[in-house]
Image (cartoon, grey):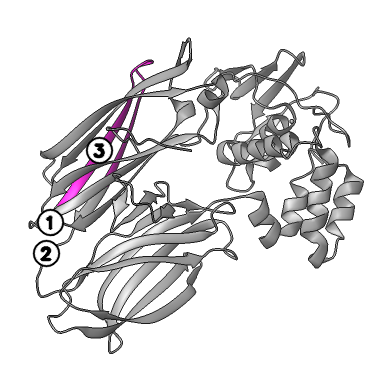
Amino acid sequence: MRIVTPIFLFCFWLVLTPTWVLGQTSFGYLEEKEPVFFVDYAAFREETSERFRLEVHYKILTKALTFIKLETGFKTSYEVQVFVSNKINKQVTGTSMEEDYFVESYRETRSPSDFLINQLVLSLYSGRYKLRIRLIDRNSGSVFELEKDFKIPSRSQKKILFSDVEFIRQLSDSTEESKFNKRGRTVIPSVSRNFGDTDPTLMFYYEIYGGPQVPKAYVLGYEISHLSQPFLYHETTTVVLGPEVFVVFDSLSLKDFPSGYYTLKVALLEKGREKAKIERPFQVDWSHLNLLKNDYLKAIEQLRYVASSDEIKELKEVPKEERLERWLEFWKSKDPTPPTPKNELKDEYYRRLKYVNLNFALPTKEGWETDMGMVYMIYGHPDEVEKHPFDRDVRAFQRWYYYNENRVFLFMDRGDGEYELQTPYDGKIRRY
């Protein structure tokens, strides 16, 4: 991760046997559908005017940008443009920023885990708006654009109201001046609102305005809900509000939450009645550890492309209290570089698993259960893809070419959108 803080602060060896070798392939023409550009916003009341401070947060995966090699490293140049229009689609404000960004190694230009986070700030009156933000790669001319509708509430002096909830990626008590400074603390936003094993704590910040002149006690409640489970979490506490802005930094544990989409609701209650509320969605990301805790048998089935049938059978029979330990032992036995802390095989396997679930999933199957998912899991990204979606007298089909492996795979659309691997296949692989 990179948090940019200058003057312009942008915020597997693989064969299907117990020991297998990872196919070394370069990226071809399969489209990557993983998002590379994220945008979020949060509005807070200005203390010296009738407006609200709109913070527009964005996150850019560096692999989405084009870098130019220099003598001392690699450089990319990009521009971010922000436009805000009202309900009749008339632009009311906007801003832009250009930035050069440098890295030392080529690996950093392609890393799936490196990114930039930044924010731009605008000032707006209450109303309904559309936010449009555009990222322009100056080296390639590529453009990424996102839109969001949002509302800034009315500034009523007789009504208690919440600011937006800003989800937090990192929080520190730094005293350094920063665009991310809030109430004497440095708050790095979680732009994608995506949480998981690496950050199992839901941290957030918000403000409450319009408390009575004479301080008064209220009940502050938190609820986390899911489409299939309305009340997964509920907690209340007592707070005393007065005319000053009431500032809240808080956190909730997501340790036992399975992957999925959730809503956080914050409500202020007086005698059991809601005086004000704010709701914001967030996501608990899919991960192998999350799945291991919540659907162990499925997590073991997903090892079919790296484990033997005997290994899978043995893992399925492990007592519950030993599951994590035995799973870790399994992957340790597959580590191509045991002396190092990094298990390249495991990391690549789960990167591929995430990719196939994003790109090849069907209404009745997850991506790893499909034929395309199977081939991708074993051989990685094809060097070239030949697509025939509209050929006359022939069902839609694709050919995947792996030049280093000297293999070609033919997939034919069954007629329902699922591409089936055609015979003769590789000879070495076939789904269980």
Quadrant assignment, res 357: top right
Q: Could you say where residue 83 lies in the image, as x and y percent from the top left?
A: 19, 37
Residue in front for this viewpoint, 1 or 377: 1
Tell me the kind of residue under disc 3. Answer: Arg
Number of the front mark, 2 or 3: 2
Tell me the kind of residue under disc 2. Answer: Arg
Q: Which residue is mark 2?
A: 155
Q: Could you say where residue 84 lies in the image, as x and y percent from the top left?
A: 18, 41
Q: CA distance from mark 2 to mark 1?
A: 7 Å
Callouts 2 and 1 close, C-beta under 8 Å: yes
Q: Could you say where residue 248 lies in the image, as x and y percent from the top left?
A: 33, 67
In this rendering, is residue 294 above or below 429?
A: below
Find the residue positioned furthest to the right. Answer: 310
| Prevailing SS of the magenta stretch | strand
Mark 1 neighbour class, 10 Å CA radius: few under 14, some 14 to 19, many 20 or more = some
Q: Secondary structure at mark 1?
A: loop
Residue 295 left/right relative to 331:
left
Q: Which residue is mark 3?
A: 132
**Disc ID at residue 126:** 1
- Residue at the (77%, 51%) spot, across then down: 300
In this rendering, is residue 292 above or below 319?
A: above
